[in-house]
Structures are given as structure tokens and as C-alpha cells.
Image: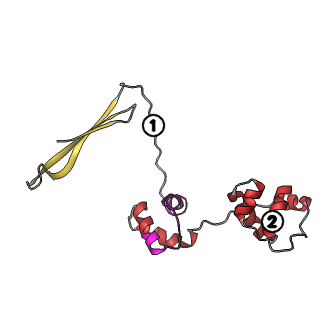
Amino acid sequence: MLDVREMLRRLRLGESARAVAKGLGISRNTVREYVAWFEAEVLLPGNPTALPTSFELAERLARAEPVAPPPRLMPYRDEIAELIGAGLQVKVAWERFASAHPDQQASYTAFRRFVRRYVDERPRRAVLRIEVGPGEEAQVDFGYARLIPRVPGEPPAKTWVFVMTLSHSRHQYVELV
């Protein structure tokens, strides 16, 4: 409770979340979560010397529900959903979003995570990885690729592809036939 009280004091003095986190030796994300809680409890604006007691803070925290700040991309959720709904891959949707909103510095990883949590409503596919020993198994696939010219300048020919994957190492051999 003393750390929470000290965090509130420092924030009331106008210190940044980064400075508070460094001074208390805690994560900036933790400070951000407490800032959201302080704002919800209307504790943040105020006199840095007139702080609530540790007991009062403990009581408020005990009955508080977790308050997480909304993701930065939430105001753009509908726009992102349109991009994804138009059949674009997430990478292409991110590139278009980044060019349309250069002020939003969302990395591709953060954008993909946002799409997975808040936009994409398809059920997740389960994946089962089967472990086998070296040399025990190889998986083979053979199928039509497309019309590909054998030599540049020649007319394209029907081309098939042979793929063999070693199950243990996941090493692949691919040959066009």
C-alpha cells in the first residue's frame, strides 16, 4: 500500500509514468493500470500532501474492479474491421492503416494482436503437433501448381509440385515436376 500511496503522490506532483516506474522499480504497465484506477476513483487530481491513508486506499482497492485502459487502436476498430472484412491479409491491412494514419505508431505485432482480440471473430483452429523420432516419418504431398514456363521465353507447361517434409526436423524438400 505504501508503494501505491507513493505512486499517487508522485503522479499528483506531475511525474511521468516512466519516471514513477523507474523510481519505484515497477513496470510502466503497472503504473498505467494504477493511473486508470486513480482516474476512475477521482484520486489523481489533487494536493500531493493531502493523500488518502494506506487503509483508505486498501479499502478502495479491495472493492474495485480491474480497470484497464482501452487499447490505442480501439477508436479505429470499425475502420480496421472494414479492412479485414474486405478480405485483406492482416499485413496488408496494417500497411494501409499505417499509411492512412501516420500519427498512430502501431507496430505490426500490436496491430495483429488487436485484430485477433477485437476484430477477428472466427473461431481459432486447434493445432496438434505430433512428435516423432528422427527418421521415423516423412510426410509427402503432390499437387498441381500452375502453368509455368520451363525456360524463360517458352510457352508455359503444366507444372506439378512434390513436397516431402521430415516430421522430426520439419526440413522440407520441394521439387517442381
| Residue 79 image position (x, y, % from top left) | 48, 72
Res 55 visible: yes
Task: Please tell me which residue is depicted at 50% across the width and 57% down the height of the picture.
Answer: 109
On whether residue 141 falls in the magenta region, the answer is no
- The answer to which of marks 1 and 2 sits earlier in the sequence is 2
| Label 1 SS | loop
Task: Please tell me which residue is depicted at 75% across the width and 53% down the height of the picture.
Answer: 25
Name the kind of residue labelled 2 in the image.
Answer: Arg
Give the number of the disc on residue 52. none
Name the kind of residue labelled 1 in the image.
Answer: Arg
**Quarter residue 21 falls in:** bottom right
| Label 2 SS | helix
Viewer-side residue, 163 vs 109: 109
Estimate how packed mark 2 is, as few (under 14), some (14 to 19) or many (20 or more) residues with alpha carbons within 10 Å.
some
Viewer-side residue, 49 vs 169: 49
Please identify the quadrant where the C terminus is shown.
Answer: top left
From the viewer's perspective, is residue 25 above or below residue 95?
Answer: above
Depth check, mark 1 against mark 2: the one in front is: 2
Q: Is residue 106 left or right of residue 10?
A: left
Task: Please tell me which residue is depicted at 59% across the width and 68% down the height of the picture.
Answer: 72
How are the colours assigned in the image? secondary structure
Res 82 visible: no
Q: Is residue 47 left or right of residue 125?
A: right
Magenta span: helix, strand or loop, mainly? Answer: helix
Query: Alpha carbon of mark 1 to alpha carbon of mark 2: how far?
Result: 50 Å
Viewer-side residue, 73 vs 125: 73
Q: Give the residues drawn in magenta, as a range.
A: 96-119
Marks 1/2 in contact by CB < 8 Å: the verdict is no
Residue that mark 2 sits on:
10
From the viewer's perspective, is residue 107 above or below residue 144?
Answer: below
Residue that mark 1 sits on:
129
